[in-house]
Image (cartoon, helix red, strand yellow):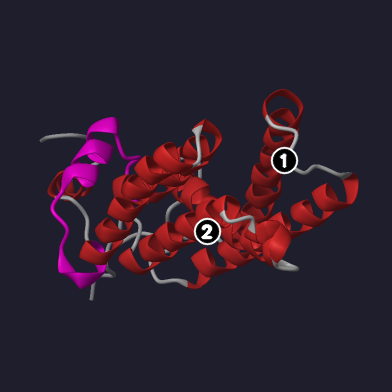
């Protein structure tokens, strides 16, 4: 009896593949729900522009980018929904000053938001061929998640400092706050990496676009 041939690894997704994945029609209740959350983020951008000014609009634009990215990356709908909800909560928490009104809320959202961004970054790296999509040890994904979380957190703290210094002094910065935020970011990235290592197919949706399936079926040496 012949042993089954091992499945060839997926080729890195192209820009065309990203566009086709982004504009595809949603399939199933979960994907429709995820698109509904994206619509809420778009509405939030408009509302923020009318009621709270350019700084809040900028924050909601970042949230919108984070909510749109899972569609292009074909992230599984359940994770897609979680990312979109996290983006909404993080942005509106800033509008209503929940980070200062509720003790510990800042750290909770830092961990959740950084975890969401970590999933996007790691999945994009897998889609782009920078990280293996299959067969990588679980601990490697966990460590990658923690590293990405700390990197994302560091960039965010720099942006906060720049915002405080050059845009709005109301933005709070401080040594203790920064260290606490980075610790929460590391935890969020670690949890995200662990989740990706335990989920079937990682963060990817099981369904793949027709063009991607055709690419996977193509022999390694090209057309014969």
Q: Is residue 46 visible?
A: yes
Report if residue 107 lies within the magenta region. Answer: no
Name, please, the residue furthest toward the bottom.
Answer: 1
Residue, x 18% and y 50% (percent of image)?
A: 209
Question: Residue at point 32% right, 55% down?
Answer: 40
Residue to which mark 1 is pinned: 171
Q: Residue at x 47, y 50 (%)?
A: 120
Tell me the quadrant of the picture where the N terminus can be found.
bottom left
Toward the right, the furthest residue is 175
Q: Secondary structure at mark 1?
A: loop
Q: Secondary structure at mark 2?
A: loop
Would you identify the image quadrant in which residue 14 lies?
Answer: top left
In the picture shown, does residue 40 fall above or below 45? below
Q: Magenta region: which residues?
A: 8-31
Q: Is residue 168 left or right of residue 47?
A: right
Foreground residue among 102 and 66? 102
Q: Residue furthest left?
A: 224
Compared across the picture, whether 8 is left or right of 99 comes to left
Give the x, y percent position of residue 107: 71, 62
Q: Which residue is identified by label 2?
A: 136
């Amino acid at each position: 009896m012949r042993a089954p041939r091992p499945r060839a690894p997926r080729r890195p997704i192209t820009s065309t593949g990203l566009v086709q994945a982004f504009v595809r029609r949603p399939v199933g209740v979960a994907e429709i729900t995820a698109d509904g959350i994206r619509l809420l983020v778009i509405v939030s951008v408009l509302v923020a522009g009318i009621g709270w000014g350019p700084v809040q609009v900028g924050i909601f634009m970042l949230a919108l980018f984070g909510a749109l990215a899972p569609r292009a990356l074909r992230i599984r709908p359940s994770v897609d929904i979680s990312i979109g909800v996290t983006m909404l909560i993080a942005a509106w928490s800033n509008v209503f000053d929940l980070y200062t009104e509720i003790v510990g809320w800042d750290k909770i959202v830092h961990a959740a938001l950084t975890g969401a961004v970590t999933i996007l970054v790691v999945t994009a790296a897998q889609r782009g061929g920078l990280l293996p999509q299959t067969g990588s040890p679980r601990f490697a994904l966990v460590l990658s998640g923690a590293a990405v979380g700390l990197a994302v957190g560091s960039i965010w703290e720099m942006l906060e400092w720049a915002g405080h210094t050059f845009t709005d002094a109301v933005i709070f910065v401080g040594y203790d706050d920064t260290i606490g935020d980075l610790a929460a970011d590391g935890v969020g990235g670690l949890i995200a990496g662990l989740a990706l290592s335990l989920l079937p197919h990682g963060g990817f949706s099981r369904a793949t676009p027709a063009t991607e399936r055709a690419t996977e079926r193509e022999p390694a040496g090209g057309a014969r």
